[in-house]
Amino acid sequence: MELCELFPGRKCREHIIKQIDTMIAEEFAKGNQVYFDDYSQLVEKSYKGNQFYLTPEGVVIYFQHSTSLFT
């Protein structure tokens, strides 16, 4: 199942990527710079709609490590 199947009629993918970018930018602002400087491009390139799971607190989106990102 794709995450966007849960939110029909919206620009789901764009919204999710924007939210992830915002969360990472907030971490940078706090001094938690554990992400690559080009995180926004990497998120856009590597986001897969089926890599998520649900918890009582909400949706968790995860990213698989891929060596193809670095080639």
Image (spheres, rainbow, N blue to C red):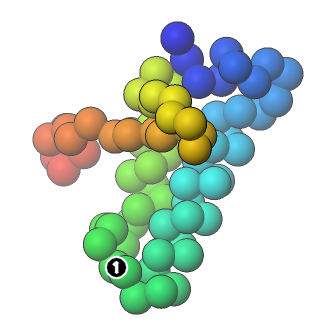
In this rendered view, identify the residue nearer to me: 63 or 43.
63
In the image, residue 67 above or below residue 26: above
Q: How many marks?
A: 1
- Res 21 quadrant in image: bottom right
User: For the point 40% across and 88% down, which residue is it?
Assistant: 31
Image coordinates for residue 54, horizontal then vertical, percent? 52, 30
In this rendered view, identify the residue nearer to me: 16 or 52.
52
- Res 14 quadrant in image: top right
Image coordinates for residue 32, horizontal then vertical, percent? 37, 81
Tag 1: residue type? Gln
Image coordinates for residue 43, horizontal then vertical, percent? 44, 49
Residues packed near mark 1 inside 10 Å, few (<14), some (14 to 19) or many (20 plus): few
User: For the point 34% across and 40% down, which residue is it?
Assistant: 63
Is residue 16 toward the left or the right of residue 33 in the image?
right
Is residue 58 toward the left or the right of residue 50 in the image?
right
Q: Outermost residue toward the right?
A: 9
Q: Outermost residue toward the front?
A: 56
User: For the point 67% across and 16% down, which residue is it?
Assistant: 5
Is residue 11 toward the left or the right of residue 34 in the image?
right
* SS label for mark 1: loop
In the image, residue 19 above or below residue 11: below
The residue wearing badge 1 is 33
User: For the point 52% across and 11% down, which residue is it?
Assistant: 1
